[in-house]
Amino acid sequence: MLVLLFMLSLLAAPVEYVAHEGGHYLAARLFGADATLHFDRVTLDRGARLSDTERLLFLAAGPAIDGIVGVTGLLLLVQRYTPLRLVLAIWLARPLQFLPPLLGVDLPLFALAGGLADTDEGQIATTLGLSPRAFIWAELALAAPLLALIVLRLPATRRLAILSVLSIGVMAGWAGWLAWGPLVLP
């Protein structure tokens, strides 16, 4: 079961990246904008014009995919633990990537450099006239109890092993996607 969990968690980051960016891409196309899907972003072609509402929905589409998959995984995980349900539920952990910049830690070697203003959430907050930091802290506050529930739904006797394998697999998949993603979706 741990080998299966490792394999699924290894795929989690690449699949999440493509699904997240795919959400942005589909929103852009839905609004008639020509867009290009890259491994870590979607670019709108020159001349693409989105209304304020369309831009907001375009920005929210990626995080919405993460939330939908994560909540679905959590609802399934609450019923019964399986490695796949766990890997889907951890999509709710997305806000954790913002902890370093929120805490003032710059990690450029891990693709965590810079501020929060350029993130989807930062741009959504700015569009809504809110503080990106406050918006992302609120997102983390919402995610924290859900993540705690995920941990509590793991079999208690294997919790540490499951979390270790999951973490190592996700981090390895993330590093692999950062290395190979540009070759797959430049």
Image: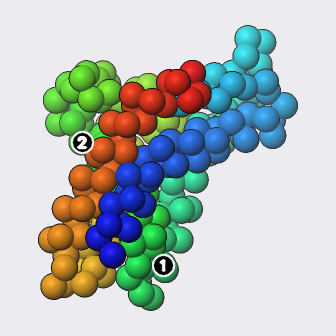
Residue sitting nearer the eye, 71 or 128 = 71
Quarter of the rendering containing residue 184: top right
**Position above or below: 40 against 43:** below
Q: How is the image coloured?
A: rainbow
Q: Residue furthest top?
A: 46
Quadrant in the picture for residue 54: top right
Q: CA distance from mark 1 to mark 2?
A: 25 Å
> How far from the left and from the top, in percent, is residue 168?
24, 52
Dividing the picture into quadrants, the one containing residue 2 is bottom left
Q: Which mark is residue 75?
A: 1
Which residue is painted at 33% across and 61% down in the image? Answer: 6
How packed mark 1 is, by other alpha carbons closer than 10 Å (few <14, some 14-19, many 20 or more), is some
Which numbered dot is residue 99? Answer: 2
Residue 122 visible in the picture: no
The amino acid marked with disc number 2 is Leu
Residue drawn where x is 68% and y is 36% of the image:
25
Along the line of sight, which residue is nearer the eye, 147 or 104? Answer: 147
Which one is in front in this view, the residue at disc 1 or the one at disc 2? 1
Looking at marks 1 and 2 on the same chain, the residue that comes earlier in the sequence is marked by: 1
Closest to the observer: 22 or 96? 22
- SS label for mark 1: helix
What numbered label is drawn on residue 5?
Answer: none
User: Badge 2: few (under 14), some or many (20 or more) residues near its Cα, within 10 Å?
Assistant: some
At which x and y percent is residue 4?
A: 38, 68
Residue 140 in the image: x percent, y percent? 32, 53
Quadrant position of the N terminus in the picture: bottom left
Q: Residue at x 63, y 22 (%)?
A: 43
